[in-house]
Amino acid sequence: MTYRSFCSPTKLLDLLIERFEIPLPEEATDLDTKKDPLMMKAVKVFKSYYLSPIQLRVVNVLRHWVDFHYYDFQRDQELLTRLHTFITSVKGKKMQKWVAALNRALDKKRDEIPSATKPVFTKKPLPVEWWLTQKPEEFNLLSLHPKDIARQLTLIMAENFHAIHPSELVDASWMKEKKKEMASPNLLKHTRFETMVSHWLAKEIVYTENFEERVTLVSRLIDIMAEMRSLNNFAGLFAVNAAFQSSSVFRLTHTLKVCQNPIVTLKQKLLHELLQCC
């Protein structure tokens, strides 16, 4: 998983193939080797106790690579072709069993549904809970139940999170301008969606027409955060918190500190608890 910080996939495969193709000692390649029983025995020992174990380890590494990090081959078709070429070139009866297992692993991965398109949830979706209207074209943060908004955001974020590969988190590659799009595409997609949600919520708060509506909307967002916490959607909590911390919302001190009634006071306490999770 960590080789990407110092080596490319193509280079790694070339090194593994080079390690697999260990040449016989120069003495063993002499034409008179077959006439020397001691040398023939030495070559046999070399193949059994040195060459075969190394080749087996190389095949095991390739099998592990295919089983757990096949996305490297999905991204680079030339890398996959290079691997197939190497597999077909392997000779020797002892290695055929392991090569066949590697071929089966490749066939299985080729027919497998990509992780990004796998259904995250398989249960039947719950019915939509409306509050003010049941017309989708009139949707806003006050028309749907907080539980339903939290569920839908959690579904999207869970699918984005599920598509992130471990290699995308290595060596902070998403911070490097030249490599981030190629090295961490799914991670960037996930973070961009969180940022988009934060900007959307901040805009909804600022665009309210009056003070009472703004307080109601902030109260609704606190309810949504509570539902996200119950769903263990901490990415969603961060996104809503980022909206509250944005400069355009943070300076709305009267909206965020209203305490005219006990209900708002309870909301403030709940908000404080939720922000502790962030």
Image: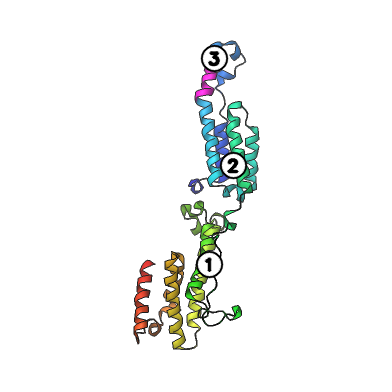
How far apart marks 3 and 2 lie (CA) works out to 39 Å
Where is residue 52? Give x, y as percent: 53, 27
Residue type highlighted by circle 1 = Phe
Q: Which residues are magenta?
A: 38-49
The numbered mark, 3 or 2, whose residue comes first in the sequence reads 3
Residue type highlighted by circle 3 = Met
Task: Tell me, for residue 105, which label it has, or none.
Answer: 2
- The residue where tag 1 is placed is 193
Task: Tell me, for residue 39, which label it has, or none.
Answer: 3
- In the picture, the quarter occupied by the C terminus is bottom left
Vertical arrangement, residue 263 with respect to residue 76, above or below = below
Where is residue 83? Give x, y as percent: 62, 40
Q: Residue at x 45, y 78 (%)?
A: 220
Where is residue 129? Give x, y as percent: 52, 75
For this view, does 246 lie left or right of residue 41? left
Q: State yes or no: residue 273 in magenta.
A: no
- For the residue pair 170 and 194, the one nearer the viewer reads as 194
Count neighbours of disc 1 (C-alpha within 10 A) and say few if under 14, some if 14 to 19, many if 20 or more.
some
The numbered mark, 1 or 3, whose residue comes first in the sequence reads 3
- For the residue pair 45 and 133, the one nearer the viewer reads as 133
Where is residue 239? Give x, y as percent: 46, 69
Q: Residue at x 53, y 12 (%)?
A: 38
- For the residue pair 32 and 97, the one nearer the viewer reads as 97
Count neighbours of disc 2 (C-alpha within 10 A) and say few if under 14, some if 14 to 19, many if 20 or more.
some
Mark toward the viewer: 1 or 3:
1
Q: What is the quadrant of residue 10 in the picture? A: top right
Q: Which color scheme is applied?
A: rainbow
